Image (spheres, helix red, strand yellow):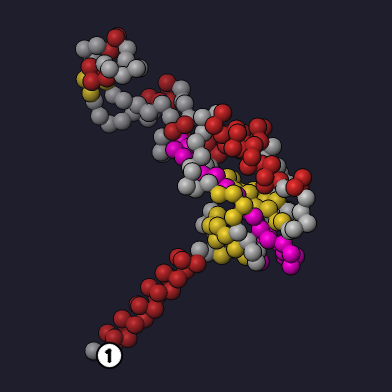
Amino acid sequence: VLFRSLRPDERLAISGDDLREFYYTFKVSPARARRNALAVVYDAAVFAEFSCWDPALAGRRVVPALAALAMGDSLAVELAQASHLGLLQKEVDACRASELVVYRAPFPRGPFWEVLAIDDHVGIQAVSARTSPALRRDRQVFQRADRVYPSVGLCQHPKKKIREADNHTVVGGEIEGRIGTIAAPRLRTAVLVALTLEQVRLRKIGRAHV
């Protein structure tokens, strides 16, 4: 059973955002960017038409460096997660301690739960026909998030944006909101079962030919 037992008239509404190119929306200091240098060398003249061109580089050879949080950058995950959490708490009034799902911590009592995993933000709301719109924390949070993300240069992935879905896979677990369960994604489970049965079949065929 997911989180708590749902009443017969309740279901779960799942909303979420996945931020596109999340690490590359961060601007880091020149000192940190120098640690993100690429292992290639160019004649500076190659970049003469770029808007960032500096005439002082004329006649020199340069090494490009990424002025963002690079994959493998020390503390990149921690900085990104903490920044996302702070933004949601300060500007969206989201991720309250009483609603945020935290690893190895007691599960919140609900009826609204939030999951934050770096660039993924998910909200799950228990609702029924009697639920007052004023109590729909999921709508409050994600309507504000829709306004806040663009204002700070963060891009929501349009194909991964969900609002009030009955069924969705969240951080590796498939939630069936109509009955309130969570499990490994059914498609992956079915593929694993099929592969296991095929292994059993092939083993029996191999023994038959011995």
Check the picture and name the quadrant holding the N terminus: bottom right
What secondary structure is marked by label 1? helix
Residue 171: x and y in percent read 53, 53
- In the rendered structure, the answer to whether residue 197 lies left or right of residue 75 reads left
Judging depth in this view, the residue of 145 and 98 nearest the camera is 145
Residue 187: x and y in percent read 46, 66
Residue 151: x and y in percent read 56, 28
Q: Is residue 61 depicted above or below 12 in this figure?
A: above
Q: Is residue 40 depicted above or below 180 in this figure?
A: above
- How many marks on residues? 1
- In the rendered structure, the answer to whether residue 36 lies left or right of residue 99 reads left
Residue type at mark 1: give it: Ala
Check the picture and name the quadrant holding the C terminus: bottom left
The stretch drawn in magenta includes residue 122: no
Residue at horizontal 57 percent and vertical 60 percent from the top: 167
Residue range (magenta) = 1-23
Residue 63 shows in this picture: yes
Residue at horizontal 28 percent and vertical 12 percent from the top: 57
Say which quarter of the image contains residue 84.
top right
What residue is disc 1 on?
208
The stretch drawn in magenta includes residue 12: yes
- In the rendered structure, the answer to whether residue 134 lies left or right of residue 62 reads right
- In the rendered structure, the answer to whether residue 188 lies left or right of residue 10 reads left
Residue 91: x and y in percent read 65, 32
Residue 100 shows in this picture: no
Say which quarter of the image contains residue 148.
top right
Residue at horizontal 46 percent and vertical 22 percent from the top: 29
Classed neighbour count for the residue bearing mark 1: other residues with Cα under 10 Å, few (<14), some (14–19), many (≥20): few
